[in-house]
Amino acid sequence: MIKTFPNGGVHPAEDKFAAGSPIKVLPAPETVIIPVSQHIGAPAEPVVAKGDKVKTGQLIAKSKGFVSANIHSSVTGTVKKIDRETDSSGYKRTSIVINTEEDQWNEGIDTSKALNRNIAAGADEIVRKTLDAGIVGLGGATFPSHIKLSVPKGKKAEILIINGVECEPCLTSDHRLMLEKGEELMVGIQLMMKALNVRRAIIGIEKNKPDALEYLGKLSSDYEGITVNALKVKYPQGGEKQLIKALINREVPSGGLPLDVGAVVHNVGTAFAVYEAVQKNKPLIERVVTVTGKELSKPSNFMVRIGTPVKALIDAAGGLPESTGKIVNGGPMMGKALNSLEVPVTKGTSGILLIPAAEAARKPVVNCMRCAKCISVCPMGLEPHLLMPATEFGKWDLAEEEKILDCMECGSCSYICPSGRPLLDYIRLGKSTVSKIIRSRKQ
Amino acid sequence: MSDIIIHSIITLGAMGGAAAIILFLVATKFNVVEDPRIDLVEEELPAANCGGCGLPGCRAFAEALVKADDISGLKCPVSSSEAMTKISVILGKEIPEPEPLVAVVRCAGTPVSRPRKNIYDGAPRCSVASALYSGESDCPHGCLGLGDCVEVCRFDAIYMNPETGLPEVIDELCTACNACVTECPRSIIELRKKNKKDRKIYVACINEEKGGVARKSCKVACIGCGKCLKACKFDAITLENNLAYIDPVKCKLCRKCAPECPTDAILEINFPVRKEKAEAQAQD
């Protein structure tokens, strides 16, 4: 049965140009820039110094605090400097810059391609290895995964949901991963199920990926408890709360977590990373990145070392087209524009999208005509037309009352608005201000 | 006929009388004694409710003035000194002469000194742009030029200069209410001591990057070279995190520092033209 979430949603053009190109391994670049903060939470603390020799997969920055993640070297080489380098937002953040030499993997890492189905690790060990490997949510949120794999006392996980929806237009990295690493993915899901102590896992995949649905569906019959479910093509089907509602018809309460309804959601990329961390001892040092665009000559999916400059990816995909007007880190709906090509790929980079200049500009902003389209498309049932002026004019109490914090920044409202109003821009500001106010109130 | 009139007058009169008695009793029972001076003080205040004093509006400030024993800590940045003298007469308390302050924009990055590298077409608010990315120029610290400070000013004392893309403060109108200082997401605006003839000398940069990086991002950035430090005879300049800062209290406006600055990051405003410069201009 084709499932979906009931409220809102939009249907942007899918434009999955790179869906047919297999994942290519991109060689390590001459230098990598590895920021120490690639995740939600406290930045990791560097444990190497300038001039140190590091091996591929070696720990170079240690997680600091509970919500944080380890950072490993993605190449073998010499630490050139630890300095503030420009990240994807244009601000300078502490990063470790490494000059690459010939690849030499850290001891204990199994680099063979052989599939290891034999699960020897216990639940605690799986969580510990996830923490050690510095795995974060690879769907884009970059929340440290070990936290989501350990169920706090008093709560119980009943079902694991694997997010293979990839509802964001243009991106194909999860799609390719499902097709090419299906077996590993299944073992990864089994590991996650063991860590969470759940019997059931559902992989949710949008219907526009029939090959992945068929392949994983066939594979899943060999693995107990894992099922594959087709989902309607609708953005944002891959939103955590939307996915839970669609697959198991439970609603995460406002301000709550999926665990409140017994569900845990992980991305397919994360499941694959967990497989590599537990079965192969390999930390998270590379990820699949889609490089795509209408005018790009070779839209591709690359297995990229973390810290590779974006420019190297674009060059490998056929070079920057003349007509490019905007380079987006992520997909067209939730991605943010880049203002430099020197910035590195981080754990949260799922795609690089090149938008031609003719399509890059925003619509001119005119007055709101109260058409209420933003309300009908909001998957969280909010009223964006109300939240924007609330933020614009500093009515923070109204914004809080109208549940601005429930917004997941999917951008459906800005996408649909016929008046071209920057709804999400303001809502993002409102969210950060309101959460600041709430935090100060608690103190 | 006359009966009806008389009856009406009597009943209505009785009802009115009863109501008056009830109202009187309630009024005496729930009477709130309020210092009459609060009203008097409030009348003298500017009624702008700008919040510059740190209290929610002029009424709250008036109450605080009346209540406090020592009012030296309470300052209304907007009130004139005459108004404050009147208030001190009403209260019979000494009010120290407040030191006049003025808002100063610590960024001089014009489109020439830090060229635009990309186009921002999002919501035209500094707070939105700043949360999103580093800005249109290479400097991640500089003014975004979208005018949040202009918007928040209740006294129309700031305007955007279309040529430089930077906000400019009209000294006569600025009341130093601090609104723009808190509004600026990059903390560029600072309140500094107001000098004679509105003269100002300050480091118009807040970039704490290392010299080379700062210079690369903007031609008029402070590179933290420390030359001004050596030129200053009054210990008014400090250098911290690659950024020089001129203490407005210690500074004697001697102008020794500005010509030393290799990047012209120190601005001198409302001073007479320097001799050498005047001569050079005459020669041109």
Image: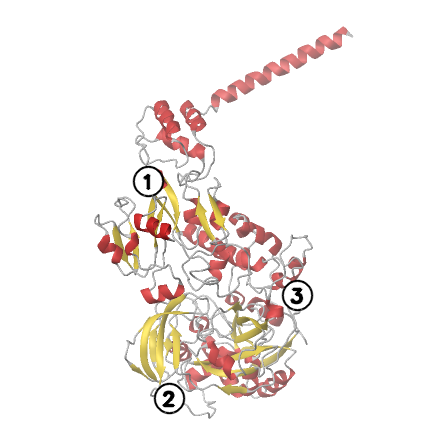
Q: From what the image shows, is residue B132 above or below residue A184?
A: above
Q: Amino acid at mark 2?
A: Asp
User: Are the residues under marks 2 and 3 on the same chain?
Assistant: yes
Q: From what the image shows, is residue B64 above or below residue A214?
A: above
| Closest to the observer, B103 or A43 | B103
Query: What residue did someone put label 1 on?
Result: B195
Q: Amino acid at mark 1?
A: Asn
Q: Chain of mark 2?
A: A
Where is residue B89 shown, x and y percent of the image?
Answer: 35, 23
| Closest to the observer, B102 or A385 | B102
Residue A103 — which label?
2
Where is residue A255 shown, x and y percent of the image?
Answer: 52, 59
Q: Say if mark 1 contacts mark 3, CB within 8 Å.
A: no
Q: From what the image shows, is residue A406 above or below residue A280?
A: above
The residue located at (37%, 44%) in the rendering is: B270
> Residue A251 appears in which quarter of the rendering?
bottom right
Q: Residues within 10 Å of mark 3 (few under 14, many from 20)?
A: few
Q: How many marks?
A: 3
> Residue A309 appears in which quarter of the rendering?
bottom left
In the displayed structure, does residue A157 sit left or right of residue A212? left
The residue located at (54%, 51%) in the rendering is: A392
Is disc 2 placed on a helix, strand or loop?
A: loop
Residue A286 — which label?
none
In the displayed structure, does residue A233 sit left or right of residue B151? right
Where is residue A342 shown, x and y percent of the image?
Answer: 44, 74
Query: What residue did someone put label 3 on?
Result: A6
Q: Chain of mark 1?
A: B
Task: Measure how far apart labels 2 and 3 are at the Cα level.
Answer: 50 Å
User: Are the residues under marks 2 and 1 on the same chain?
Assistant: no
